[in-house]
């Protein structure tokens, strides 16, 4: 009898430990203890919830049935639970394999299904090629594209995307234009020949000028990153005649993520990692589990889908400035514009030292535009992020009070449109690219070619 009582007490203690572990290891406590910005990404929150449910359910079961439990039975039930999970996972893997048998790899980016791509047979193959692109570390610039050659996307060994140019030799008569910017200049969502730099080349050469245009755009690049890229090219002996910058979105979004003007995308998370002397064991386990589950587990991925359907869209926004009030957002917008102005002065001095001419443009974004269509608002969940929308509008308001040399604000260039140009809050279709290129070429001619 004594032995039975001791065994019950042991199971009771074990049950309490399981239960308390599930209660205490919640996302809020873990965020406070192990996340420097007191936030945990959705994929890691899923892991925490699964762990909590298992711990609490196991603890309650042990407490309630402690009189009837035996060590062997407990071990048997744990093994049985594990087998059930494996069976469900294998079942989902088989269903996925059968339902997708003979199909090509699924494209996670579904923008090719948007009405904006109706009648464009190249849309899906283009996005298939985009899904195959990869990046690599670039000195001082942080990242850049690896070489790639496809039907619609071609990137040379230096990471520069192909631009349409006439078949003319690069002689004294042909002048060069280097175009810098983020993914909108790179050409997210369009083929090589329909990027903004390609349209610029077509229009300038059709007007009787001899230009060779280079697309130095890169995904998520800020204005200052583009200038650093230019500095590196100048260091290596490249000498453009003209330099064009087309920016705005990446500068705002980098600051929005970190709450600090001038920061690169995801620089806040990198900064926090460098602040730590070492990564904790729990964080290493979380990172490893997340990577394995994201890559291989169908149960995990189905739970992610369910959570996204149940959670309000606002819960997806984890950026630092998402919680800012109007005063803080206005201060941040002011900082973004002032940082941009300082970088522009650096560019101005470079142009004098190296003998090139420059022209800069602030790009359009659907948040600040008019005549935004239903198709455009439905294409991006960030239309529900009120803080990000305000930051764009406040930045534009402050920008209009500044007079920078060789700078043009063309953020309203798409306001008079009668059809959908945006494929998300920032990127635009080939038709939109042509409208933008028309304006850039027109202002470029007035600024530098009117006397030629």
Image (spheres, rainbow, N blue to C red):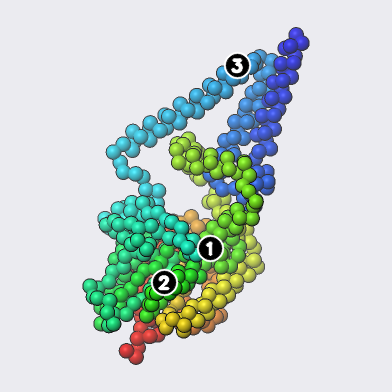
- The extreme top residue here reads 1
Observer-nearest residue: 422 or 136?
A: 136
Cα distance in 3D space between marks 3 and 2: 71 Å
Please report whichever mark, 3 or 2, sits nearer to the chain's N-terminal start: 3
- The extreme left residue here reads 167
Q: Which mark is residue 73?
A: 3
Image spot of residue 169 (x, y percent): 24, 76
Observer-nearest residue: 408 or 208?
A: 208
Instruction: Tell me: 450 left or right of 333.
Output: left
Q: Which mark is residue 302?
A: none
Cα distance in 3D space between marks 2 and 1: 24 Å
The reply to whether residue 352 is in sight is yes
The reply to whether discs 3 and 1 touch (Cβ–Cβ < 8 Å) is no
Which-is-in-front pick, marks 3 and 1? 1
Residue at screen point 27% across, 79% down: 171
Residue matched to label 2? 236
Residue matched to label 1? 264
The reply to whether discs 2 and 1 touch (Cβ–Cβ < 8 Å) is no
């Amino acid at each position: 009898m004594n032995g039975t009582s001791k065994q019950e007490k042991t199971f009771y203690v074990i049950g309490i430990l399981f239960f308390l572990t599930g209660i205490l290891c919640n996302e809020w406590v873990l965020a406070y203890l192990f996340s420097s910005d007191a936030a945990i990404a959705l994929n890691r929150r899923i892991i925490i919830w699964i762990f909590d449910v298992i711990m609490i359910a196991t603890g309650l079961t042990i407490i309630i049935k402690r009189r009837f439990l035996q060590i062997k039975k407990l071990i048997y039930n744990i093994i049985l639970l594990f087998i059930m999970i494996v069976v469900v996972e294998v079942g989902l893997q088989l269903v996925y394999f059968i339902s997708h048998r003979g199909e090509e790899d699924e494209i996670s980016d579904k923008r090719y299904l948007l009405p904006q791509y109706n009648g464009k047979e190249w849309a899906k193959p283009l996005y298939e090629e985009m899904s195959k692109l990869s990046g690599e570390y670039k000195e001082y610039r942080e990242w850049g594209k690896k070489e790639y050659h496809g039907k619609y996307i071609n990137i040379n060994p230096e990471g520069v995307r192909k631009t349409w140019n006439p078949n003319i030799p690069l002689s004294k008569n042909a002048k060069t234009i280097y175009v810098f910017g983020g993914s909108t200049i790179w050409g997210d969502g369009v083929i090589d020949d329909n990027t903004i730099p390609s349209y610029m080349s077509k229009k300038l050469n059709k007007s009787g000028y001899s230009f060779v245009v280079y697309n130095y755009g890169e995904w998520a690049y800020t204005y200052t990153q583009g200038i650093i890229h230019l500095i590196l090219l100048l260091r290596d002996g490249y000498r453009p005649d003209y330099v064009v910058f087309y920016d705005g979105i990446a500068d705002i979004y980098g600051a929005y993520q970190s709450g600090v003007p001038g920061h690169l995308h995801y620089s806040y998370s990198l900064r926090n990692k460098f602040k730590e002397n070492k990564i904790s064991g729990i964080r290493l386990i979380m990172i490893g589990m997340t990577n394995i589950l994201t890559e291989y587990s169908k149960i995990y991925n189905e739970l992610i889908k369910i959570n996204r359907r149940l959670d309000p869209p606002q819960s997806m926004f984890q950026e630092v400035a998402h919680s800012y009030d109007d005063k803080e957002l206005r201060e941040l917008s002011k900082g973004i514009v002032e940082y941009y102005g300082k970088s522009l002065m650096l560019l101005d001095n470079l142009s004098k030292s190296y003998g090139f001419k420059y022209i800069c443009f602030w790009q359009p974004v659907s948040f600040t535009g008019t005549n935004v269509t239903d198709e455009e608002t439905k294409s991006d969940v960030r239309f529900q992020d009120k803080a990000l929308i305000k930051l764009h509008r406040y930045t534009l308001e402050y920008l209009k009070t500044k007079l920078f040399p060789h700078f043009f604000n063309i953020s309203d260039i798409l306001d008079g449109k009668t059809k959908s140009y945006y494929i998300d809050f920032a990127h635009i279709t080939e038709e939109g690219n042509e409208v933008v290129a028309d304006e850039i070429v027109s202002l470029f001619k007035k600024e530098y070619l009117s006397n030629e």
